[in-house]
Every structure is written in structure tokens, then in C-alpha cells.
Image (spheres, rainbow, N blue to C red):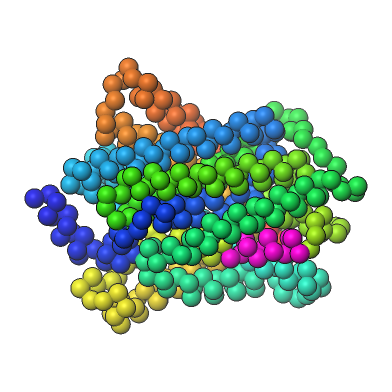
């Protein structure tokens, strides 16, 4: 009876039927997961290390990787358990509300997901505009175009791409995204090694702040950035795009994703921090192409890397928009009419266009790339990826309180709840401090 009611509900749910079609294979999950996690935000890793130092930086990077893989694995098991009990969930908010038995949890998760999706959407458009500005400046150093104009260009392209109707329809774009991430990682690592071995290489200083309070704030901001870089707040929605049974496919997809993570995260973090130390910018490109001197790597290498990043940003913006689209189309679309019928096409065109314009407008007003990563990591990704999966697993499988699994999960929840609170405070504090340096619609991205 419950299964039939859920089936009837899904048949009336245009967000599920159109946006979250369940047709994918395990490698499609790998493409989606990699695009959701391995993006140009990894260019912030040397900057994150500048607030932690070598030892703590490598430790936190490794810890985040282990904990997030474990959390995503637990989440997949919980989704599979619910599906076997005829309670298949395709949305994070519905899963949390069902297992925790709380109506407010539904709204808490949807609020957090909205924060993440909008934050990543804004960040993708902002960084895309910055990439275009970098290319433009290399061709026309004294050109008149401003950052907000490049952001408008990226927004226009995103409006066109946003009309791809389903998450599954992004699978080929996300394969290209995976290859692009490997491509620009190779180029950036090579550029950092080249910069660090120049005779006129910038002086390297790996020391941290001497004042204890500033040192602590910087460390928690850096941890929040790492959490945001590893974060994936749409895992249930990605698993929903897989053809049932999905659990085994999802684990294979996670394996593919974390191979790419291991290849890209460590190489960029180590090479970038080695080359620039605590002077690393929130975007390593800014360190490689300083305003007050020549580029520290061959122009063609940096130009090609910027182009790869720009192309991948379109995929990332599309992936993180899917939750917003399925929320909109759950109410605006009619599942009884075709996906491309006039009845469904017109609302999709209008609503998705307005969403992208909003993200582009915010990106133009508030170009704080590093700070946006930190705030989204602390407020969004830490609760969803470092706390809720362990809580959902404990509530679903009910391991004995004396068991190792129970205590591991409980310890992770306790530690990252504290980290999230401190990270939110320190990252918002830095955002407020940086706001004093900035004017609306400025032409510089503030670190």
C-alpha cells in the first residue's frame, strides 16, 4: 500500500519525473559526483593551507577526504535501506524528514540546500567572469571592460545551458567536466612548479599569524573552505538519477570520484602552497599572474588552464542548479503533458532564466570568491556532509551504543558540529572585514 501511494505520488511529481529521471549507470554517477566535488574551488586549496600550515593542512585535507567518503557511503546505505522498505527517497530533505520523523527537519535541509546551491551557483558565475577577465586582460591589458560585464556574459551562457531539461541529460557534459578537471590540474601544477623554480621566484614564507586569536580564526576559516571543497549537498538527488537498484552503482561512482579527488586535490594543494606559501591568493591564478609583474608561468599554459576552468564552471553551475529546478518544476510543470510541451516549456524557460539572472546579479555585487567558499562550507556543507549522514545512519540501523560504529559516528558529529559553529563565526567575520575593502559591482575579486 505504501509503495503504491508513493508510486502515485511520484507519477504526479513533475520535479521527480522530469528533472530527476532514474536512468543512469554507475559511471554516470561518477561523472555527476566528480562535477559536484572536483571543481575550480580546488584552486583555493593553497589559500586554505596558508591558514593551516604544512602539517595541519595535509592532516585536515586527508581527514576531510576520509570522513566525506565514509559519510557518502553511509548515506548511500541509508537510501538503499529505505528503498528496500518501499520508502524510496530521491531528495535529501524528504530522506531526513522521514528518518528523523520531524517536519522542521524538512525545512532545515531545504534551507541548507538552497544556501549551498545558490552559493555554488554564484561562485561558479563569479569565477567564470573572472576567468574571462583574465583572458581579456592578457589580450588587451588596458581594455575598458569591467568584471561585472564578464559576469553578465557568463550568466547569459548559463541561461542557455540551463534549459537542458533533466539531470541525466548532463551526463556527457559532466564527463567532459571530469576530463577538464584533470587537464587544468596538470597545467596548474606544472605552472606552480615552474614559478617556484624561477630565479626571481617570489619569496616563500610558510609561517602562520603570530597572534593566537587571528591564527585560530584563520585556521577555522581554512577548515570551512576545505569542507566546502569536499562538500556535496546533492548526493541523494544524484543517486536518484540511477536506474534501480542504485546502491552498488553509487558506491562504484564514489570510487571513481575519489580517485580523481586524490589525483587533483593533493597535487594542487602541495604545489601551490610550496610555490607561494602564506601569500597564496584565494584563486591560485592570481598568484601565478600578479598585477605588479610578469606572469610566473608560460602564457599559453595559464591561458589553456583558464579556458578549461571556464568550461568546467558551466557544468558545475548546471549540476548545482538541479535541486532548484526540481523544486520549481514540482509546482510549475504538469507531469501529464510532455516535457517539451508549450505548457511545460514556457514556465521552465522563464523560471530557470530568472534563477540564473539572480545568481549573476549577486555575483556582480559581491565578488568574494574565497569568502563565499568558507561561508558555504561552514553553514551548508558541514551540517549536510559531516553531521547528518552519521545521524541518519545511526537512526536507521541503530548500532549498539557500545559498538565502534556508533562511537565513530557520534564522535564525527560532535567534532564537526563544533568545527561548523567556529567556522561559521570565523568565515562570516572575514566576510565582514573584507566588505570594508569593497564597493558594489567592483572590478576586483577580494581574497
Q: Position of residue 55 (x, y in %)?
A: 67, 29
Q: Position of residue 19 (x, y in %)?
A: 34, 64
Report the span colored magenta. Answer: 300-311
Q: Is residue 42 visible?
A: yes
Q: Position of residue 147 (x, y in %)?
A: 68, 68
Horizontally, residue 227 falls left or right of residue 205, namely left
Q: Is residue 108 magenta?
A: no
Is 383 drawn above or below residue 415 in the view shown? below
Residue shown at 84%/45% (left/top)? 197
Q: Quick one: 137 or 111, which is closer to the camera?
A: 137
Q: Is residue 122 visible?
A: no
The secondary structure that most of the magenta stretch takes on is: helix
Query: Farthest residue toward the left?
Result: 1
Residue shown at 45%/60% (left/top)? 319
Is 194 drawn above or below residue 78 in the view shown? below
Is 256 drawn above or below residue 393 in the view shown? below
Residue shown at 63%/63% (left/top)? 308
Q: Is residue 305 magenta?
A: yes
Q: Quadrant of residue 213?
A: top right
Horizontally, residue 49 falls left or right of residue 138, namely left
Query: Farthest residue toward the top?
Result: 402
Q: Position of residue 179 (x, y in %)?
A: 56, 58
Horizontally, residue 52 falls left or right of residue 74, namely right
Amino acid at each position: 500500500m505504501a509503495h503504491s501511494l508513493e508510486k502515485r505520488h511520484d507519477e504526479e511529481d513533475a520535479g521527480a519525473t522530469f528533472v530527476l529521471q532514474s536512468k543512469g549507470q554507475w559511471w554516470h554517477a561518477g561523472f555527476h559526483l566528480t562535477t559536484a566535488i572536483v571543481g575550480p574551488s580546488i584552486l583555493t586549496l593553497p589559500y586554505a593551507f596558508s591558514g593551516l600550515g604544512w602539517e595541519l593542512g595535509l592532516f585536515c585535507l586527508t581527514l576531510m577526504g576520509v570522513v566525506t567518503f565514509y559519510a557518502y557511503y553511509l548515506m548511500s546505505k541509508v537510501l538503499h535501506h529505505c528503498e528496500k522498505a518501499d520508502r524510496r527517497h530521491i531528495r535529501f530533505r524528504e530522506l531526513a524528514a522521514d528518518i528523523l520523523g520531524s517536519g522542521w527537519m524538512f525545512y532545515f535541509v531545504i534551507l541548507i540546500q538552497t544556501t549551498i546551491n545558490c552559493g555554488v551557483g554564484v561562485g561558479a558565475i563569479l569565477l567564470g567572469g573572472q576567468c574571462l577577465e583574465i583572458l581579456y586582460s592578457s589580450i588587451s591589458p588596458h581594455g575598458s571592460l569591467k568584471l561585472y560585464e564578464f559576469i553578465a556574459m557568463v550568466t547569459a551562457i548559463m541561461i542557455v545551458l540551463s534549459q537542458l531539461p533533466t539531470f541525466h541529460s548532463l551526463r556527457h557534459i559532466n564527463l567532459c567536466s571530469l576530463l577538464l578537471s584533470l587537464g587544468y590540474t596538470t597545467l596548474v601544477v606544472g605552472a606552480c612548479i615552474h614559478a617556484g623554480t624561477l630565479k626571481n621566484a617570489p619569496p616563500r614564507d610558510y609561517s602562520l599569524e603570530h597572534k593566537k586569536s587571528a591564527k585560530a580564526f584563520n585556521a577555522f576559516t581554512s577548515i570551512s573552505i576545505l569542507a566546502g571543497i569536499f562538500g556535496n549537498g546533492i548526493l541523494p538527488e544524484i543517486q536518484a538519477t540511477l536506474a534501480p537498484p542504485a546502491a552498488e552503482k553509487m558506491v562504484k561512482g564514489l570510487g571513481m570520484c575519489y580517485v580523481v579527488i586524490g589525483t587533483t586535490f593533493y597535487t594542487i594543494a602541495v604545489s601551490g602552497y610550496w610555490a607561494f606559501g602564506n601569500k597564496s591568493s584565494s584563486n591560485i591564478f592570481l598568484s601565478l599572474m600578479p598585477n605588479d609583474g610578469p606572469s610566473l608561468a608560460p602564457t599559453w599554459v595559464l591561458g589553456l588552464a583558464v579556458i578549461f576552468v571556464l568550461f568546467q564552471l558551466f557544468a558545475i553551475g548546471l549540476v548545482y542548479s538541479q535541486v532548484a529546478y526540481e523544486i520549481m518544476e514540482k509546482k510549475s510543470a504538469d507531469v501529464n503533458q510532455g516535457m517539451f510541451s508549450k505548457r511545460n516549456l514556457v514556465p521552465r524557460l522563464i523560471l530557470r532564466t530568472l534563477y540564473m539572472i539572480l545568481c549573476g546579479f549577486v555575483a556582480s555585487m559581491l565578488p568574494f570568491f574565497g569568502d563565499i567558499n568558507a561561508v558555504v562550507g561552514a553553514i551548508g556543507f558541514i551540517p549536510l556532509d559531516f553531521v547528518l549522514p552519521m545521524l541518519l545512519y545511526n537512526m536507521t540501523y541503530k548500532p549498539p551504543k557500545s559498538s565502534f560504529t556508533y562511537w565513530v559516528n557520534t564522535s564525527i558529529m560532535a567534532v564537526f558540529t563544533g568545527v561548523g559553529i567556529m567556522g561559521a563565526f570565523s568565515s562570516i567575520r572575514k566576510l565582514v572585514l573584507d566588505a570594508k575593502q569593497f564597493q558594489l559591482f567592483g572590478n576586483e575579486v577580494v581574497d
